[in-house]
Image (spheres, helix red, strand yellow):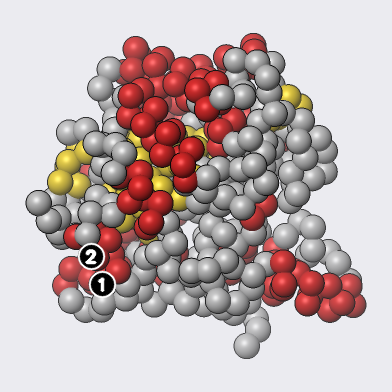
Amino acid sequence: MQLSFFESSCIAGVTFPNRLIRSATHEGMADERGAPTEALEKLYLRIAKGGAGAIITGYAGVQQDGKSSLSNMLMIDCDELIPAYRKLTDRVHEQGVPIILQIAHCGRQTRSAVTGMQTVAPSPVKDFIFNEEIPHALDDREIETIINNFVAAAERAKKAGFDGVQLHMAHGYLLAQFLSNHTNRRRDKWGGSTENKFRIISEIMRRTRESLGSYPVLAKINAYDGRPKGMRVEEAVEIARMLEAAGCDAIEVSSGTVEDGLAIMRGPNPPVGALFNSSFRFKDMSPLIKTISSPFIRFSMRSPNPLRGYNIKAAKAIKEAVSIPVITVGGLHDLSDISSAIESGSADYISMSRPFIIEPDIAGKFRQGKQTASRCIMCNYCALMIEVDKVKCYYGKLPGRK
């Protein structure tokens, strides 16, 4: 049966008005405790009123040492946060749009200078970007604590009125670190074989199901990345099968790690100017050093090809291997490409991030025939400037500059 982008559908009993999802995007709009602010509520309402089929929140941390180095990250590590989230979900539900909480632990992709705690990872492998220290290799007790905190986060999400949770298993964060041979060098029950690397996730799924029954649990995974001995499509297909067997309700297919540069969010021109104005590694450099280093950084920040629809092929391979819904994200900004991906059977749903930043009502514009493509120019300034400000579209220009 051919699927339509505009038709309503269900995932685990949750009704989606259409098949275009706002993918998880760090907004930088939490307060000092990690609770959603009025600004975030207003943003989500704009997206909901604008016709999105569902909203997946920016990642919410399950414990303090897994907090992002980016400012104002959402947290879901204590019960005191539930009322603020309940207010948020109630307002979004008034628009008839489901909202899913993405839950995460950043692992080695953060900084102790920000969290005040030592970074942790499956193995003591330095991160190329966040390489201030060698991360502490988690022991069995610490892994058990993380598993239980993911489950507790899902329990809080349900109490707060979210329609489900999404496990962030992509982009080089902790769960992805366990799945990748590049970051997981363990030889115990948490490493080695794909089954062992997946164990932390299977335990999260098992305990969540024991606690919450059929409460919807989705997963965002990497189909591949650019790391030596990292994730490849063949293993991602195997992981997708394991997720389905573990009771996962839908899989969102993405790719890349922070170390890969602009592999996650690709674009035609390296956003060097935004990097120099935002990154903790570059913003305090002298103008002379920035000028000298600019050509080398521009070269290293080049996006791989293709720039559009770069996860479609991998999503199709995964969709052919599982019977649960498959969502894909990545460079799908044109209505014809979106419709083609769904109608061809490459994916069941499409998710977008950058188009919803520049146009929170992009889904409605597509449906109403007002436009057939996002106005996003893929400059990626939004992805870098989030380190120093809340999410917004810069359209390739820094504030105060022509």
- Distance between the alpha carbons at the discs numbered 1 and 2: 5 Å
Question: Residue 19, image x and y in percent?
Answer: 23, 54
User: As displayed, is residue 146 above or below residue 382?
Assistant: above
Residue 310 or 357: which is nearer the viewer?
310
Question: Residue 127, image x and y in percent?
Answer: 74, 44
Three-letter code, disc 1: Ser
User: As displayed, is residue 61 above or below residue 72?
Assistant: above
Q: Which residue is mark 2?
A: 339
Q: Which mark is residue 276?
A: none
Q: Is residue 58 left or right of residue 17?
A: right
Judge the density around disc 2: few (<14), some (14-19), many (≥20) Cα neighbours within 10 Å.
some
Assign the C terminus to one quadrant of the image: bottom right
Question: Residue 370, image x and y in percent?
Answer: 21, 79
Query: Cβ–Cβ below 8 Å for labels 1 and 2?
Result: yes
Q: Which mark is residue 336?
A: 1
Judge the density around disc 1: few (<14), some (14-19), many (≥20) Cα neighbours within 10 Å.
few
Residue 93's image quarter?
top left
Residue at position x 72%, y 73% in the image: 298
Residue 393: in sight, yes or no?
no
Residue at position x 28%, y 54% in the image: 346
Residue 364 or 89: which is nearer the viewer?
364
Three-letter code, disc 2: Ser
Secondary structure under the numbered disc 1 in the rendered image: helix
Residue 279: in sight, yes or no?
yes
Residue at position x 89%, y 73% in the image: 289
Residue furthest bottom in the image: 402
Q: Is residue 331 left or right of residue 78?
A: left
Secondary structure under the numbered disc 2 in the rendered image: helix
Question: Residue 385, image x and y in percent?
Answer: 62, 63
Residue furthest front in the image: 234
How many discs appear? 2
Residue at position x 38%, y 56% in the image: 313
